[in-house]
């Protein structure tokens, strides 16, 4: 394991630099295709490569690499190639001591590099599995459409997702086995414009109506309640001129809870009219939660014994495609196998170079515990 982890870490750092060198914001076809070409080149030569339609229309097709073996288990490695950083703000990888800073480094090209390195190790051990596959999608960051790949892998024994890793407060290696459901609530407002100086009383302000809706949504938040619901207004857009009552507007809110059903009362609380402003609420993005604590408990115990140090199941509030695969039938889903780092979605996004070795060891231990059980 130590020898394999060293190979994985060394290759992952080099391949991370190549992947981060490509600017690949969600929806950009050229960037996505260049990343897919790199990922394909980094796959083992034994892998059968497929391109499948992306969940989001007009995006580059997603990448699947498959290895066939003589064992009995089927395992899926999961990641995404898209980032949230625009071309103008993109930063190639730069090293400062242990810190590798670059756009998409931790979310999640570092994890992608580790998953591809693990595929190469698995190619050398076909007796461990019936099938090992890697799925890399191009729309994780901004997807509002249904996830199309769940049924394709529903019969697999395990899913390992390589979103950024973490450690517990006392320094133990952690993986993610529980995530909240997540949704984006959008409310459109349609009022009536008027001159804000000479006849403000004739207008009906979409801005004020949406501001009132924002208060309603925030009032639904109940983080200490049974579903741990958080309802947070995040974006309000309204108005085109400083001297006109704004007739239209848009409010966006971020919702998180243990269950998707916990969002229904938030939607029901929004009126369809406020002060003669028509309101149209809609959920534009709803991702299921994930709770694989029970199906993965024995695996993490066995992996910890193999590794010689604890691997702890943890929880994270952020959304991940791992939740879709878990909801689609892969009960043994483990996320957060990527490297340690921080600053996701910011100009200072980074990965710890040292953690590539430690997280490669974790990934190998978990994979061995799954396949050799």
Image: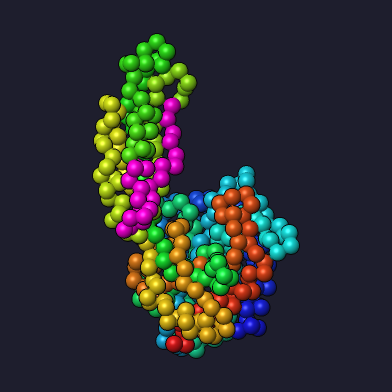
Q: Quadrant of the N terminus?
A: bottom right
Q: Residue at x 47, y 79 (%)?
A: 300
The image quadrant that residue 99 belongs to is bottom right
Which residue occupies the extreme right position in the image? 97
Classify residue 44 as left or right of residue 267.
right
- Residue 136 visible here: yes
Residue ID at (62%, 44%): 88
Q: Which residues are magenta?
A: 217-239
Q: Position of residue 113 (x, y in %)?
A: 59, 68
- Residue displayed at 54% across by 64% down: 164
Which quadrant of the figure has residue 362? bottom right
Vertical order, 281 against 28 (above or below): above
The residue drawn where x is 62% and y is 79% is: 5
Classify residue 271 as left or right of residue 184.
left
Q: Nearer the viewer, residue 347 or 81?
A: 347
From the image, which quarter does the C terminus lie in? bottom left
147 is higher (above) or lower (below) than 86 = below
Considering only vertical position in the picture, is 221 above or below 63? above
Residue 83: % across, % down: 54, 54
Mark count: 0
Q: Nearer the viewer, residue 218 or 321?
A: 218
Residue 224 lies in magenta, yes or no? yes
Task: Report if residue 49 is visible in the image.
Answer: no
Q: Residue furthest top?
A: 198
Residue 78 as seen in the image, left or right of residue 31: left
Rendered location of residue 34, percent (x, y) = 59, 58
The magenta stretch spans residue 11: no
User: Toward the viewer: 40 or 25?
Assistant: 25
Q: How is the image coloured?
A: rainbow
């Amino acid at each position: 394991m130590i020898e394999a982890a060293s190979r994985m870490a060394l290759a992952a750092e080099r391949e991370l630099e190549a992947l981060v060198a490509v600017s690949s914001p969600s929806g950009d076809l050229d960037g996505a295709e260049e990343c897919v070409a790199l990922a394909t080149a980094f796959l083992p030569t034994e892998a059968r490569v497929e391109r499948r339609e992306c969940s989001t229309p007009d995006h580059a097709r997603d990448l699947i690499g498959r290895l066939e073996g003589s064992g009995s288990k089927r395992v899926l490695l999961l990641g995404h190639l898209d980032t949230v950083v625009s071309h103008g703000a993109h930063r190639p990888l730069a090293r400062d001591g242990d810190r590798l800073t670059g756009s998409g480094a931790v979310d999640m090209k570092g994890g992608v590099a580790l998953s591809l390195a693990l595929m190469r190790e698995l190619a050398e051990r076909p007796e461990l599995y019936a099938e090992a596959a890697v799925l890399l999608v191009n729309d994780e960051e901004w997807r509002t459409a249904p996830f199309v790949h769940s049924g394709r892998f529903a019969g697999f024994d395990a899913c390992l997702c390589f979103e950024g890793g973490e450690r517990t407060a006392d320094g133990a290696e952690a993986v993610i086995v529980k995530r909240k459901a997540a949704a984006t609530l959008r409310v459109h407002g349609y009022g009536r414009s008027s001159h804000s100086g000479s006849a403000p009383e004739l207008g009906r302000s979409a801005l004020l109506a949406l501001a009132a809706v924002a208060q309603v949504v925030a009032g639904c938040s109940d983080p200490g309640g049974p579903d741990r619901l958080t309802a947070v207004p995040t974006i309000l857009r309204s108005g085109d001129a400083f001297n006109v009552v704004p007739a239209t507007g848009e409010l966006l809110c971020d919702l998180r809870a243990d269950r998707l059903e916990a969002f229904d009362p938030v939607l029901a609380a929004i009126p369809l009219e406020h002060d003669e402003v028509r309101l149209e609420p809609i959920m534009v993005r709803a991702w299921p939660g994930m709770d694989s604590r029970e199906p993965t408990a024995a695996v993490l115990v066995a992996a910890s014994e193999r590794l010689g140090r604890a691997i702890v199941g943890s929880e994270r509030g952020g959304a991940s495609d791992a939740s879709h695969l878990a909801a689609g039938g892969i009960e043994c889903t483990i996320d957060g196998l990527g490297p340690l780092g921080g600053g996701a979605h910011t100009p200072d996004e980074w990965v710890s170079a040292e953690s590539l070795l430690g997280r490669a060891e974790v990934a190998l231990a978990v994979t061995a515990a799954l396949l050799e059980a």
